[in-house]
Amino acid sequence: MLFNEADLVVHHTPGDTPYLLVVFGPAGYGHTATHDYFGKVVSEKKRIETIGFAAKVDNWYMTPELDDAFEVIQPILQRFDKVIVVGMSMGAHTAIKQARRLKAHAVLAMSPKFSLDPEECNVPQQYLDKNFKPHMRGMGIKPEDDSERIIVAWDPMDSTDEEHAQLILAALPSASPVRMFYARHGVCESIAGADFMKEIIDSLRRVVS
């Protein structure tokens, strides 16, 4: 464990990959944040060098602690020429937002929300009740978040995810869409399995602009 504060935990899994994987996990796993992160089993089994961000609080990683955590991980980041960023749901928004800061070679954002700010888009009431806070206003994905290697994966049959994906693609002209029909919100389950996930992550390393 590299970092452990009130909102955020950051883990490190050593590996032997020529790239660094940075993962931002989904909401709903605060109870496991101190000992687990999204994709940890895959990283350990496949020896993928990984920094795993896990949220104790489902605040879309919009906490001042994120700046402190980034300072802590700098020595590891500096060891790698290629950084692959993967985010799921809540973490997918962060993966896009922090891609430039991480100097990401490629980003896989699975089922991302464009924003939770009701002034920017339609937001299901459950997110407004449980997650949205005043300091999150204006959190929407913006053109300045664009990168040539952002891949957005979602199920178009999920009406909320479809609406938010289209807003993201409109804001990020260079982003590549991957439509995963019948996957529902949990698109990560459609690509589950250590071998398959490792192949996908390796392919992201080979992505060129």
Image: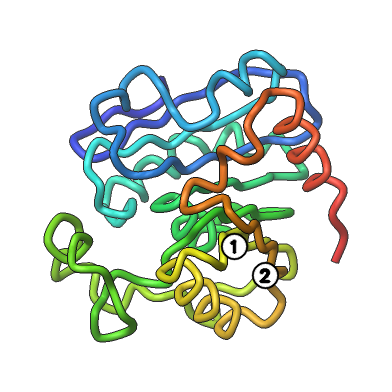
Residue 167 screen position, x and y as percent: 50, 81
Residue 39 screen position, x and y as percent: 54, 29
Residue 49 disc label: none
Q: Distance between the Cα atoms at labels 1 and 2?
A: 7 Å
- In the image shown, does 18 or 149 lie closer to the viewer? 149
- In the image shown, does 110 or 91 lie closer to the viewer? 110
Q: Quadrant of residue 192?
A: top right
Residue 88 left/right relative to 108: left
User: Mark 2 falls on what kind of element?
Assistant: loop
Residue 8 screen position, x and y as percent: 29, 37
Name the residue that disc number 1 marks. 100
Task: State the quadrant of the N terminus.
Answer: top left
Give the tally of numbered discs.
Answer: 2
Residue ID at (49%, 47%): 88
Name the residue that disc number 2 marks. 147
Q: Are marks 1 and 2 in contact (CB under 8 Å)?
A: yes
Task: State the quadrant of the C terminus.
Answer: bottom right
Residue ID at (28%, 39%): 28
Residue ID at (68%, 23%): 194
Closer to the observer: label 1 or label 2?
Answer: 2
